[in-house]
Image (cartoon, rainbow, N blue to C red):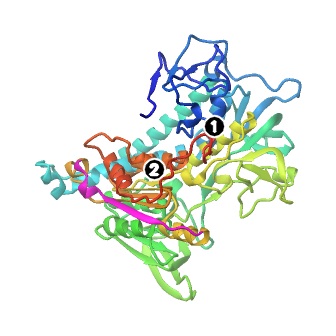
Amino acid sequence: MQSSISLSLSSPSPITSRSNCAADSPQLFFTNTTTPNQLRFCGLRRESFSGCKSYNAIRFKQLPPTKQLFASLSGNGTPSKGRGFDYDLVIIGAGVGGHGAALHAVEKGLKTAIIEGDVVGGTCVNRGCVPSKALLAVSGRMRELQNEHHMKSFGLQVAAAGYDRQGVADHAQSLATKIRNNLTNSMKALGVDILTGFGAVVGPQKVKYGKVGGTETVITAKDIIIATGSVPFVPKGVEVDGKTVITSDHALKLETVPEWIVIVGSGYIGLEFSDVYTALGSEVTFVEALDQLMPDFDPEIGKLAQRVLINPRKIDFHTGVYATKITPAKDGKPVTIELIDAKTKEPKDTLEVDAALIATGRAPFTEGLGLESVNVQTQRGFIPVDERMRVSDSKGELVPHLYCIGDANGKMMLAHAASAQGISVVEQVSGKDHVLNHLSIPAACFTHPEISMVGLTEPQAREKAEKEGFEISIAKTSFKANTKALAENEGEGIAKMIYRPDNGEILGVHIFGMHAADLIHEASNAIALGTRIQDIKYAVHAHPTLSEVIDELFKSAKVVGRVSSATPESGCSLRF
């Protein structure tokens, strides 16, 4: 019989693991014969159980308040004693990554300051994922209301749908403001010192901040995290005027809805904006340098997404071409875009359109950070780091007490990846070694339907398998067999898993369909925790829910080996 677990919590106060079972900490009670080492919880490290005897049922039971003060109650801590530092941790940049690191640092009892030169929230909150989701929420509703066949299938009759452009724009900006205030207030509530100004490193464990051309203040810190994020990448030959030739920063303001817009780049940013613009009535033309659209996605998912997201809509495309020159509209003349063949470099075409959106990715914002003071040289603008986010100098040697997270290091340019990296760094500076498994970090594209993924694509998995000498298998399930999806008349979509049939290891999961961005996390957590298919396939999912798409995916996999998930003895990719 498997061990049972019961959790009894009288309040939402935090619970911490200890290396002993002292009476002043939340206790773990075991009964009968099962030992802690037999429990399959990758998230519970062995030291959490040391000093405890063997039992059978784990019961986490909260005891009365102890002498330990958590950050939310005790404030921002005190700086390292006897070392003469102003702060234990200073973070340059108050985006999602810096915010996540700051909150975790205060929780760990570190006196923390965060420097923000613009506004709290960084790119994600102010010019990225947050306002774009507000626009995509509008586009999703517009699509549904405009789809007469879809509405009739529910027995609904809807008059012609319309929209107020300024109202849509205000919705996006209102959401950004609300989330920005939430982040600011959360840090203030915990006592994080928010320092305004442009921050830069001036030497080992020293940072300056202040307004450009104004008075600057120098502070010291035991550890420093650079979290300055990124800005839109604009290729050479492209002239951005912010009106007719724009980046995502401008597009999120939705100052206009052009009749015909070219989107240069068909990655996450380009796809999401094509969803918004076509829902609001624009015609879209993609310009993609590679030979296929959506080159960053699993090829099979990309082909299906093209059939659903591109082909039926007012979208055409040019692949295998570069936009070498883009000139804004002026004096009654349209925006002109000169295209050349990506391979031969021969002129291919010239487009004349109402607007152009440059969605060619993002570039790290790392200039002026004073990196030369610690002998650090960027690589294509990115700050070099190791797997623990520790910064390396020009000789490849680690710079003591200096870390870089998020877009500025280029490892994985996603807001939640930056936050995870920040938390990982705080664990390290607090005395616990921690290495983040980036293959367990999910990504999503919030089109209608959505696309999500975690781990390796099929080509990447096959390359890895050939190199390391193992076989891979593919499992697939369809949204057309899911009751909840059919009830919503949203049966278009698939889930795909790449895995090892010899041991049940999940290598990658890709989903295209309704709420794919929400469904991916069961797979990403399984990868993070080292859970094998032969174990997770017994998990129970509520019926009828979309989560059953993933349930069926796990159940359809054919695993030959009998290797179970990692235990605290054997270790796993995620450490606490």
Which quadrant holds the N terminus? top left
The residue that appears at 28% across and 68% down in the rendered structure is: 312
Picture layout, residue 325 above or below residue 75? below
Q: Of the residues shown, which amino acid type is indicated by label 2?
A: Ala
Picture layout, residue 485 above or below residue 112? below
Q: Is residue 351 visible?
A: yes
Residue 99: image quadrant is top right
Question: Real-space Cα distance between discs 2 and 1?
Answer: 19 Å
Image coords of residue 63 (percent x, y): 55, 13
Image coords of residue 535 (percent x, y): 44, 46
Residue 21 appears left or right of 210: left
- Which residue matches tag 2? 523
Image coords of residue 166 (percent x, y): 38, 47
Sequence-first tag of 2 and 1: 2
- What is the magenta range? 469-483
Image coords of residue 568 (percent x, y): 60, 39
